[in-house]
Amino acid sequence: MDSSKLKKAKVSAKGWVVIPATLRRRYRLQPGTVVEFQEEGEKLVLVSSKGDPVEELFGKLAGPVSLTAALLEDRATELNREEAALRLG
């Protein structure tokens, strides 16, 4: 890496390091993103972890109404129609 592009951060007493905002944006590191530390020779490399794909997709397909609520409403409507048909028949 070009030394003019190196970003620096200080390690706190608790071992915390703040990743510069420009790098967080470039690598899409959001709060809660899991990162991994890898040793490569004399270097410590920070790598964004892929995480659990099921957990990452949780809620992505959710619509404005839950599928369960929609099915229960549909079943109640169907039941009312059936009861009305039995009363008329």
Image (spheres, rainbow, N blue to C red):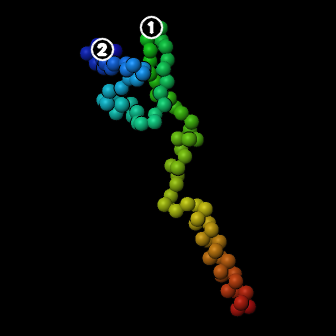
Report the quarter where the N terminus lies. top left
Rendered residue at 52%/49% (across/down): 59
Q: Is residue 86 visible?
A: yes
| Residue kind at label 2, given as amino acid type | Asp
Nearer the observer, 11 or 30: 11
Left or right of 3: which side holds 49?
right
Most distant residue in the top direction: 42
Percent x, y of residue 23:
34, 28
Using the image, tell me which numbered label, if any, was put on residue 2. 2
Report the quarter where the C terminus lies. bottom right
Is 56 placed above or below 80 here? above
Is 54 placed above or below 13 here? below
Is 72 placed above or below 33 here? below
Left or right of 16: which side holds 84?
right
Left or right of 25: which side holds 78?
right
Rendered residue at 39%/19% (across/down): 13
Q: Secondary structure at mark 2?
A: loop
Q: Quadrant of residue 29?
A: top left
Say which residue label 1 marks: 42
Most distant residue in the bottom direction: 88
Percent x, y of residue 67:
58, 61
Nearer the observer, 72 or 26: 72
